[in-house]
Amino acid sequence: MPKKLAILGSTGSIGTQTLDVVASHPDEFEVVALAAGANLTRLFEQIERFRPALVSVATPELAAKVKERFGKAVQVEAGQAGLQAVATCPEADIVLTAVVGTMGLRPTLEAIAAGKDIALANKETLVAAGHLVTDLAARRGCRILPVDSEHSAIFQCVHGEQTKEVRRILLTASGGAFRDKKREEMARATREDALAHPNWSMGAKITVDSATLMNKGLEVIEAHWLFGLPYERIEVLIHPQSIVHSLVEFQDRSVLAQLGTPDMRVPIQYALSYPRRLAADWPSLDLLAVGTLTFREPDWDRFPILGLAYQAGKTGGSMPAVLNAANEAAVDLFLQEKIGFLEIEKTLLGVIEQHDPVGNPSLDEILFYDRWAREMARRLALR
């Protein structure tokens, strides 16, 4: 029987690549539910090709358009209730969460509560509420299968190993669009400059996060929760080629690395098929063509947001959620061209300085501080 799949964020970059994987293995996977935003053109194509029984869109108005097109052939829901319906779809064996930001937090928790395995592409869920997610998954016996290329690499390297034998994790980072730029150049950077990622094709928000190194900071916090290591044993390396997706050093000083072409379908497929490995039709890694693999330490002075993320992770409690929410608000303002690129970090620092963290916050507290941080970020950035 094929594994039945529900996707939160089906029309985004990760969602569409997930459906590419599904299309390549029709005997292995069946799509039973899709949650999209407002891209009806792409969603209509997905419904026609994959025939899910349940679909969710952002608003009731959009839901009406889906019903007008497909009638009773598909159940249509909207808004947060629609996300919940897709996340808890009774037929689904695994839920891939690829919605951007903390919008994915509640439906991910609801999916786990319903006993679903999670293919996690929404790093903000663990950043904001890692203690809640990991505790609930342990109690419900659900697996959290990482989709981020870096965390998938670590997951593959530690497969069959004892966690206590891991000495440290080495997360690799492309360095983003400004990895070789000076601060003066970043101060003049435009929206288009920041979105010109040298290696990956991703959504706008995550591409800007890559340019600030916030994406790597969020991944450090995510790795802490996924693999149970303290922050002192999670390190970051700049690796411009994006071929080594991450490394794990063990207590005997052996180092395992996972290598592959910069193609998100690889970690997506591994998460969906785990513990099996399915055949793939994308190009093999050609190390002779790559020629050289280089690594260097992050420039903490040029990219101070990475240090802020470590600081927030070590502080814990509500601080990571506040940092993440402030970043989402600041990046949105930058993408709207209302603030400059370097004003993102200035805004985050201002919000962190205003926050008195709460330890072990509940979901309601996390969502409260998420709203507070967004409002504070906008106030500080636009004053």
Image (tube, rainbow, N blue to C red):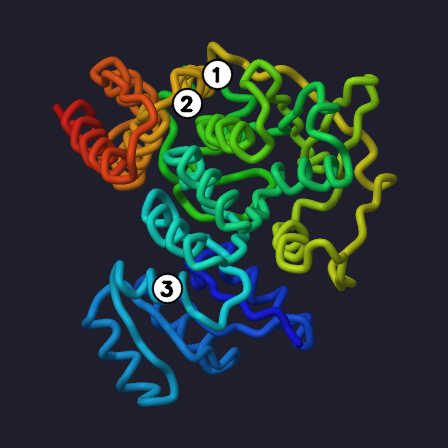
Label pair 1/2, CB-CB below 8 angstroms: yes
Number of residues whose C-alpha sits closer than 10 Å to that of mark 1, classed few (under 14), some (14–19) or many (20 or more): few
Crowding at label 3, few (<14), some or many (≥20) Cα neighbours within 10 Å?
many
Image quadrant in which the C terminus is located: top left
Q: Amino acid at mark 1?
A: Lys
Q: Is residue 191 above or below residue 111?
A: above
Q: Is residue 168 above or below residue 370?
A: above
Q: Which residue is mark 1?
A: 182
Which residue ends up furthest to the left in the rendered image?
Answer: 383
| Residue found at the very far right of the displayed protein | 288
User: Which is nearer the N-term, disc 2 or disc 3?
Assistant: 3
Residue type of the residue flagged with mark 3: Ala
> Which residue is painted at 27% across and 22% down in the image?
358
* Residue 359 in the image, given as x and y percentages of width and height: 32, 22
Residue under the image location 15 percent in, 27 percent down: 382
Foreground mark, 2 or 3, reads: 3
Disc 1 is placed on an element classified as loop
Q: Which mark is residue 186?
A: 2
Q: Earlier in the sequence, mark 3 or mark 1?
A: 3
Q: Quadrant of the N terminus?
A: bottom right
- Residue 291 vs residue 66: left or right? right
Callout 2, which amino acid?
Met
Residue for badge 3: 36
